Amino acid sequence: FRLAPEQAEEESSEDRRVAATLEAAENQGFFKDMLLEKGKLPPLPLKNRYFAMRHGQSEANAAGIIVSDPVNGCPKWGLTPEGRDQAAASGNSLRQLLGEDRIKSESLQVVCSDFKRTVETAEVLLEALGRKHEKPVICAGLRERFFGKLELGDHERYGDVWAIDHDNDEHTEFGVEAASAVRRRTTAVLRDLEKNHSGKIFVIVSHGDALQITQTAFAGIEPAMHRTLQHMNPAQVRELLPLPE
């Protein structure tokens, strides 16, 4: 299912609370501690509803290169005009799906990676939802998977990494971040949101590999199998639904 800000001087009190919660968790080593959880989901049933959204087409996508290092991805390599259109279209579709009451409610929060392409996607999404004066909540735990020595190289090299993932989700060939490590940090973010919030709708704006791997936790499969799941297109939104217990 494909669904497809100018920012105010102050965030809403709820936005600030979510941001403070995530920042405190990072500062206190919560995400590091959660490595022991092996990327498990929080206890079911989940208290909140989660939608994954991949960023829209980025300048790196258009150039056909890998940008996974925060040194490169946070200050530059934002969205293309097409990517902005994709994010806006997804926002309009999500607005129709959830309805105006939920969209306007403080129960809906947009949380994104700190890369420029995800921040811009989140901003365009909020504008499409009629909330352009809000800022997305930024969380480094949702960053792109780090691709090590392949940084700024041809994006065709993704396939080399994925082939090894299939046999060993702990591998760090080429200096990449292991698929298992990606799942541990992204599910740690979800666990923290579950710990501190209830009855909310979170739109998690992140990256292709990060979201693909996160979905394995919901599907009940190992991170090694992430490429067996349906690929997420630029700016696609997909509800994250865990398997029933």
Image (spheres, rainbow, N blue to C red):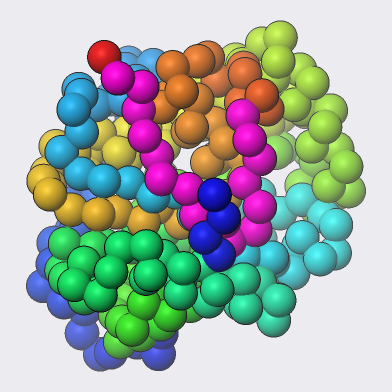
Q: Residue at x 83, y 47 (%)?
A: 155
Q: Residue at x 65, y 58 (%)?
A: 234
- Tell me the quarter of the image containing the C terminus: top left
Q: Nearer the viewer, residue 227 or 65?
A: 227
**Which image quadrant for residue 224?**
top right
**Which image quadrant for residue 100?**
bottom left
Q: Position of residue 128 (x, y in %)?
A: 43, 80
- Residue 75 magenta-drawn? no
Q: Nearer the viewer, residue 59 or 23?
A: 59
**Which image quadrant for residue 184?**
top left
Q: Which residues are magenta?
A: 229-244
Residue 108 lies left or right of residue 63; in this view the side is left
Q: Would residue 121 be visible to someone looking at this image?
A: yes
Q: Would residue 138 be visible to someone looking at this image?
A: no
Q: Position of residue 122 (x, y in %)?
A: 45, 69
- Residue 241 magenta-drawn? yes
Q: Residue at x 66, y 11 (%)?
A: 168
Q: Nearer the viewer, residue 238 or 114?
A: 238
Placement of 31 over or under 76, stated as above or below: above
Placement of 84 over or under 18, stated as above or below: below
Placement of 168 over or under 207, stated as above or below: above
Residue 49 lies left or right of residue 200; in this view the side is right
Residue 13 lies left or right of residue 148; in this view the side is left
Q: Position of residue 213 (x, y in %)?
A: 54, 31
Q: Position of residue 50 (x, y in %)?
A: 32, 46
Q: Residue at x 77, y 60 (%)?
A: 61
